[in-house]
């Protein structure tokens, strides 16, 4: 229950004074600074300025070496530097491996469940691919050849290293179930993302809700979760 004995202001603060005088937004609240190369945009303490974090160090000294995009199979993926690694900031939508070998389109559930090699499908339908990317089967992740040359699908060890670099203990990263709270909130897109979600996107990972496809070919987790392969 809400323990506020006063009315909440427009910023959701119990007994607060709302947006500061002369400001345009609630301090610390998500906003959009209009720059596609920043993330985690929030209003300043005086509510007058909306600013975000720069995704790529312009000096070129970060893990992306100053590169803001990578072009792969006809699409430009924005990049983001998180801890010691350079990441795609969008889900992959490649339909061939790095050598140009086409992957199987496994849209039919029977084809998905009986596949014996790398393949993919759309998350809901073909119209969703532009926003959510593609779903890949386990063969695609394990061969680890769907990414551009020099890039990889992270294994579980590097995922744990990523979590430790963000401040979590080794003990926390070894949990086999839900772990490293509130990392999920930091990774999720916020309400100003192209596909909005209820996270803060504090680290710029920009995760968006998408289903997982089970071995039987059924979709699970529609609209309230996201899943990522390890290699």
Image (tube, helix red, strand yellow):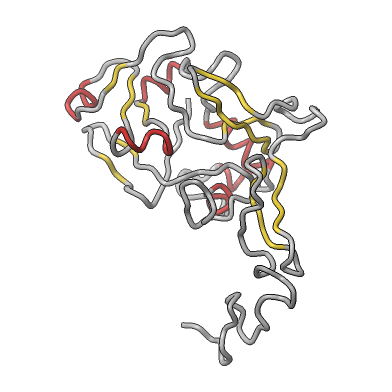
| Vertical arrangement, residue 222 with respect to residue 114, above or below | below
Q: Left or right of 125: which side holds 210?
A: right
For image coordinates 62% across by 27% down, the residue present is 69
Q: Left or right of 9: which side holds 132?
A: left
Among the 4 quarters of the image, the one containing residue 7: bottom right
Q: Position of residue 170 (x, y in %)?
A: 63, 43
For image coordinates 30% across by 39% down, the residue present is 124
Q: Position of residue 2 (x, y in %)?
A: 50, 83
For image coordinates 34% across by 26% down, the residue present is 137
| Vertical arrangement, residue 17 with respect to residue 27, above or below | below
| Vertical arrangement, residue 107 with respect to residue 30, above or below | above
| Vertical arrangement, residue 48 with respect to residue 55, above or below | below
For image coordinates 20% across by 23% down, the residue present is 111
Among the 4 quarters of the image, the one containing residue 35: top right
Q: Position of residue 63 (x, y in %)?
A: 72, 28
Q: Position of residue 4 (x, y in %)?
A: 56, 87
Q: Left or right of 214: which side holds 16?
A: right
For this orientation, the residue located farthest to the left is 110
Q: How many marks?
A: 0
């Amino acid at each position: 229950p809400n323990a506020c004995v006063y009315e909440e202001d427009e910023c959701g603060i119990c007994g607060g004074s709302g947006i500061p005088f002369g400001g345009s937004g609630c301090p610390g609240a998500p906003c959009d600074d209009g720059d596609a190369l920043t993330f985690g945009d929030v209003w300043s303490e005086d509510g007058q300025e909306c600013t975000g974090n720069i995704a790529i160090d312009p000096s070129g000294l970060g893990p992306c070496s100053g590169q803001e995009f990578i072009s792969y199979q006809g699409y430009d993926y924005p990049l983001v530097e998180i801890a010691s690694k350079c990441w795609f900031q969008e889900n992959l939508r490649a339909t061939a491996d790095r050598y140009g070998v086409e992957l199987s389109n496994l849209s039919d559930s029977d084809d998905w469940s009986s596949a014996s090699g790398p393949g993919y499908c759309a998350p809901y339908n073909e119209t969703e691919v532009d926003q959510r990317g593609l779903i890949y089967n386990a063969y695609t992740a394990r061969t680890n050849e769907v990414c551009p040359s020099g890039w990889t699908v992270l294994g579980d060890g590097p995922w744990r290293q990523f979590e430790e670099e963000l401040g979590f203990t080794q003990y926390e990263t070894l949990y086999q179930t839900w772990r490293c709270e509130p990392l999920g909130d930091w990774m999720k897109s916020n309400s100003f993302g192209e596909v909005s979600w209820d996270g803060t996107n504090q680290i710029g990972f920009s995760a968006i809700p998408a289903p997982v496809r089970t071995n039987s070919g059924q979709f699970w987790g529609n609209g309230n979760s996201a899943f990522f392969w390890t290699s």
